[in-house]
Image (tube, helix red, strand yellow):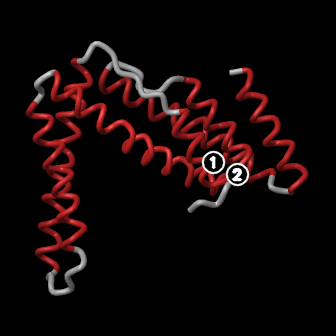
Amino acid sequence: VRHTVMLMILGIIKAIFTKTIISSILGLIVGALFLEVLSRIIEKVIGKRVFGEGDSYVLAGVGSIFGLNNTIIILFLSFLIQAISSLPIYVKSLITEKKYTTIFYLSLFIFYTIFFLYMQSYYFLNIWIIIALIISYLIIGIKTIMVILKNIKSESGIYLPFAPSIILASLIILFGIL
């Protein structure tokens, strides 16, 4: 906590000199509140905290340095990095624990996502086919989330260290890789 508070202070000082104080303060607030609120909502649903409080502090510090717009980009990049890096480990644990229903729904969601993206490239689709695709995609997505949350709720402990993803996303933005 002490190091991230220093990061927040340095971000505010930098913002004063670069005349981006409003963006810096908003980045700090969004960074702190978003993960904290999301974590508490998930905690109410599944009964366990999935992000540590330190993750909220890290994102607040990053927000104070990068400002509001980049903090939002970093947040989305962080979730993408987290999903990509966690998925193989999660699937391996599902196979080990023989949770084939979850594997089925997760696979169905991934394949349908690819199919959905592929079908968007066709211009001949009429509005009713598009609506049917979107509704079926939402149904599969909601069912997949429900099955995954049921598994998370029944597991003895789950914790997703999110700070490494935040730091990697920050580096990507810092060095202009995207």
Q: Is residue 132 above or below residue 7?
A: below
At 9% from the left and 32% from the top, the residue drawn is 100
**Element under label 1?**
helix
Q: Residue at x 73, y 25 (%)?
A: 3
Instruction: Answer with left or right where residue 40 lies relative to residue 47.
Output: right
Q: Which residue is mark 1?
A: 171
Q: Residue furthest right?
A: 17
Q: Residue at x 67, y 56 (%)?
A: 175
For mark 2, does the 10 Å Cα neighbourhood hold few (<14), some (14 to 19), or many (20 or more) residues?
many
Lateral position of residue 24 relative to residue 75, left or right: right
In the foreground, 32 or 88: 88
Q: Can you tell which of label 1 and label 2 is closer to the viewer? A: 1
Of the pair 81 and 18, the residue shown nearer to us: 81
| 3D distance between C-alphas at marks 1 and 2 | 14 Å
From the top left corner, tell me how far across and down residue 169 is, in percent. Answer: 56, 47
User: Residue 102: which disc?
Assistant: none
Residue at 53% across / 47% down in the picture? 75
- In the rendered picture of this protein, how many numbered marks are placed on residues? 2
Residue type, numbered disc 1? Leu
SS at mark 2?
A: helix
Percent position of residue 107, x then y? 16, 46
Q: Residue 12 appears at what percent x and percent y?
A: 81, 42
The amino acid type of the residue labelled 2 equals Gly
Q: Quadrant of the N terminus?
A: top right
Q: In the displayed structure, does residue 136 sit left or right of residue 77?
A: left
Q: Is residue 158 above or below residue 13?
A: above
Pick whichever of labels 1 and 2 is earlier in the sequence: 2
- Measured as percent of width and height from the top left, residue 134 is found at 19, 64
Quarter holding the C terminus is: bottom right
| Label 1 environment density (alpha carbons within 10 Å; few <14, some 14–19, many ≥20) | few
Residue under label 2: 67
